[in-house]
Image (cartoon, rainbow, N blue to C red):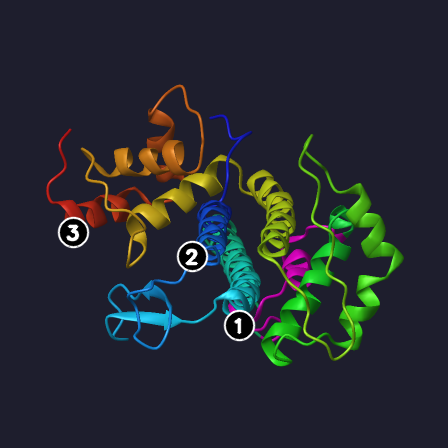
């Protein structure tokens, strides 16, 4: 079994979100720019020319009418960027939760360990540094990205708790040597410069653009990839088969209903298609499920979901 390119369920979900997020932010920004170029419709009002916007399925009348969209487009672009950054960190926090859950499940099934709730808060409360500590990942390995990650966390907190106005923490981080150095070292594609970080003034609205939200997503993805690679190394073959068996069959709500010929084929499909594991022989799945004492439970669950297996 080749797991050199494998990804965890948590990383798969984050990567999938960021791919969709990138497209959505660019389409929304383009739509706003297009709206800003619309000319007034002379037939829209007896009192004067107005710009008319469709409302789709929303209950706002036949259309929306504006004398000018300049200020509306500007504020809407800021709003989209703000909501985008919040969405990025919502997805990343979900990655942290998933990563901790995979860690606990692996340790429980493979080694019979249980999480110590006297020292560990609910998995819903996990943060980056706490996760790294609990899964045995050295935070120093994130030195290249951590200043930028902390910078965007401070920005997210301003959006969540200060109506988008800059805090002293964000102002300090904006001009810190660590953040500026991390920004200068960040990988750049030829012809694709990084967006200049927003100028933060205490108490003033942070001048965010969509590009900043997308860049925050890149930073979070880089952090997540390092954690993903660490967990893949920890889990090995058995951990990946366990993860695939759990999410494809054993969980109450499987991620994808994929009716294959039998339980092992369902697990194999998740391993190869979703988690990018490469295998020479399907019999590896049978052996590892048996080692984990999951063969019977997977087959019973298959019958519950899909009926009698086809061998």
Q: Nearer the viewer, residue 42 or 214?
A: 42
Q: Residue tagged by mark 3?
A: 304
Q: In which quarter of the image is the C terminus?
A: top left
Among the two numbered marks 1 and 2 on one chain, the one whose residue lies closer to the N terminus: 2
Q: Nearer the viewer, residue 49 or 248?
A: 49
Please give left or right for residue 156 compared with residue 25 in the image.
right
Question: Image point 80% across, 49% down: which residue?
Answer: 182
The magenta region covers: 118-139
Which label sits on residue 90?
A: none
Q: Residue tagged by mark 2?
A: 38
Question: For residue 137: magenta?
Answer: yes
Disc 1 to disc 2, C-alpha distance: 51 Å
Q: How crowded is mark 3: few (under 14 residues within 10 Å), some or many (20 or more)?
A: few
Among the two numbered marks 3 and 1 on one chain, the one whose residue lies closer to the N terminus: 1
Disc 3 to disc 1, C-alpha distance: 31 Å
Q: Residues within 10 Å of mark 2 (few under 14, many from 20)?
A: few
Say which element carries label 2.
loop
Say which element carries label 1.
loop
Q: Is 273 located above or below residue 85 in the figure?
A: above
Q: Which of marks 3 and 2 is in front?
A: 2
Q: How crowded is mark 1: few (under 14 residues within 10 Å), some or many (20 or more)?
A: few
């Amino acid at each position: 079994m080749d797991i050199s390119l494998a990804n965890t369920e948590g990383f798969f979900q984050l990567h999938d979100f960021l791919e969709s997020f990138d497209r959505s932010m660019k389409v929304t920004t383009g739509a706003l720019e297009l709206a800003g170029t619309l000319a007034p419709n002379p037939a829209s009002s007896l009192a004067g020319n107005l710009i008319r916007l469709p409302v789709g399925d929303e209950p706002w009348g036949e259309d929306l009418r504006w004398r000018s969209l300049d200020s509306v487009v500007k504020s809407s672009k800021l709003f989209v960027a703000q909501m985008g950054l919040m969405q990025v960190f919502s997805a990343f926090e979900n990655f942290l939760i998933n990563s901790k859950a995979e860690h606990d499940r692996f340790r429980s099934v493979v080694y019979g360990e249980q999480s110590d709730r006297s020292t560990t808060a609910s998995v819903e409360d996990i943060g980056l540094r706490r996760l790294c500590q609990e899964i045995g990942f050295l935070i120093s390995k994130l030195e290249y990205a951590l200043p930028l990650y902390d910078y965007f966390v401070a920005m997210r907190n301003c959006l969540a708790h200060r109506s988008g106005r800059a805090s002293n923490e964000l102002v300090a981080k904006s001009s810190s040597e660590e953040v500026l150095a991390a920004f200068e070292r960040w990988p750049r594609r030829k012809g694709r410069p990084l967006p200049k970080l927003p100028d933060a003034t205490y108490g003033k609205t942070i001048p965010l653009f969509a590009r900043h939200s997308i860049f925050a997503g890149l930073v979070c993805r880089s952090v997540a990839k390092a954690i993903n690679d660490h967990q893949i190394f920890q889990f090995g073959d058995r951990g990946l088969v366990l993860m695939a068996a759990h999410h494809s069959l054993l969980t109450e709500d499987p991620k994808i209903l994929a009716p294959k010929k039998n339980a092992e084929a369902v697990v194999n499909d998740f391993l190869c298609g979703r988690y990018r594991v490469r295998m020479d022989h399907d019999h590896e799945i049978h052996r590892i499920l048996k080692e984990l004492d999951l063969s019977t439970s997977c087959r019973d669950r298959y019958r519950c979901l899909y009926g009698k297996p086809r061998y």
